[in-house]
Amino acid sequence: MPDLSLLLAAALAHAARGWHVFPLRPDDKRPAFPDHTADDCTSRDPRCRTGHTGWEHRATTDPDRIRRAWSARPYGIGIACGPSALVVVDLDVPKHPDDTPPAEWAGACDGLDVFAALAARHGTPVDPFDGFGPGAPPRGGIDATYTVSTASGGSHLYYQHPDSGRELRNTTGDRGGLGWKVDTRAHGGYVVAAGSTVNGRHYETVLDCEPAPLPAWVAALLGPAPRQVHRAAAVVLPPDRHGRYVAAAIRRQVDHLTAAPEGERNNALFISAAVLGELVAGGALTDTDVYTVLEPAALTTGLSAREVARTIASGLRAGARRPRYLRDIREAA
């Protein structure tokens, strides 16, 4: 585990770049503070006296606060992307042998392959002989930018958040994101910074330069959805036990989504869309019904319109593979 002086030096160096840092639990990805959710806040934490204060609002570039925190314990270092005006592209790797890409990304080995394919499709051609490594720039077609190797063997590419347009938020893989094993972190998200460890494995800077502007094609893919957002409305269902079953299923999924804590809302939306997508595949609901009930609820959680639209579409595709027919339901919910 890194010693206090090394962690303090790393935290101060990140703050000197204008990146807002906050403590993570030692050798862990989770924030050290606060130790409670907004729902569990009792205002006993000194920084919550006027209302719950989460990790994003606690992040700082103040050297004095940083010295106090990292002189106490060997905290890991989190960077709050929103206050730091960063968009970080997280290129992950498979977690186990069965963690394989969907058909759309057949042949890809990891998130780098997917991001390189996207760069070739939307940006510039990719040289397959380029790649990451000590002193090596990113693969051709991907703008050279500040890059960190992660504990899992993946990479974090740091980019500047666009100065204009809507705030970009987090996306998750092919669940409303850029693609398989490609996550993004922006407003509402954070990354583990270089100098930290997770489970004894290091996060290290492999390309130390200023973050490049976010490529226009990435900003366009992450931008707001062009279509009109569905307004909250009641779904018309038959007044029989099957209708009651579907109505209960809708209520459960809306409750599941709106109760999801920060950082898990996109995944909760995907699960809810997939569950209701099974009923769509079985003929009990339509795609429009699912958008009508989930989209307004998801927007109230802080997810962007584009993220919501993409994630619901992904969930519906997943649910379509597992049709649930009402004729197989023996009892109403």
Image (tube, helix red, strand yellow):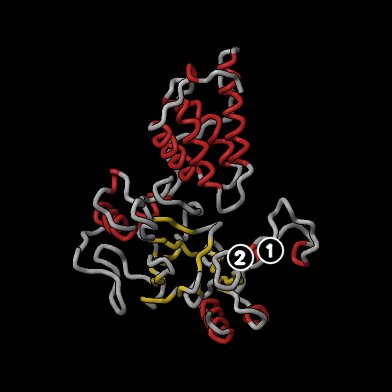
- Using residue 12 as the reference point, say whether residue 121 is left or right of it: left
Q: Judge the density around disc 1: few (<14), some (14-19), many (≥20) Cα neighbours within 10 Å.
A: some
Choose between 143 and 261: the one closer to the eye.
261
- Residue 151 lies, with reference to residue 268, above or below; the image says below
Label 2, on which residue?
Answer: 31
What residue does disc 1 label? 34
Q: Determine the residue positioned at 47% across, 57% down.
A: 164
Q: Along the horizontal axis of the image, is 313 left or right of 298? A: left
Q: Nearer the viewer, residue 24 or 130?
A: 24
- Callout 2 crowding tier (Cα within 10 Å): few <14, some 14–19, many ≥20: many
Asked whether disc 1 touches disc 2, contact meaning CB atoms under 8 Å apart, the reply is yes
Q: Residue at x 39, y 47 (%)?
A: 174
- Give, as a three-letter code, the residue at label 1: Pro
Whole-percent x, y for residue 187 in the image: 53, 57
Q: Quadrant of residue 234?
A: top right
Per the image, label 1 sits on a secondary structure element best described as loop
Secondary structure of the residue carrying numbered label 2: loop
What type is the residue that disc 2 sits on? Pro
Q: Position of residue 8 (x, y in %)?
A: 57, 82
Image quarter in which the C terminus is found: top right
Whether residue 323 is situated above or below residue 96 in the rendered picture? above
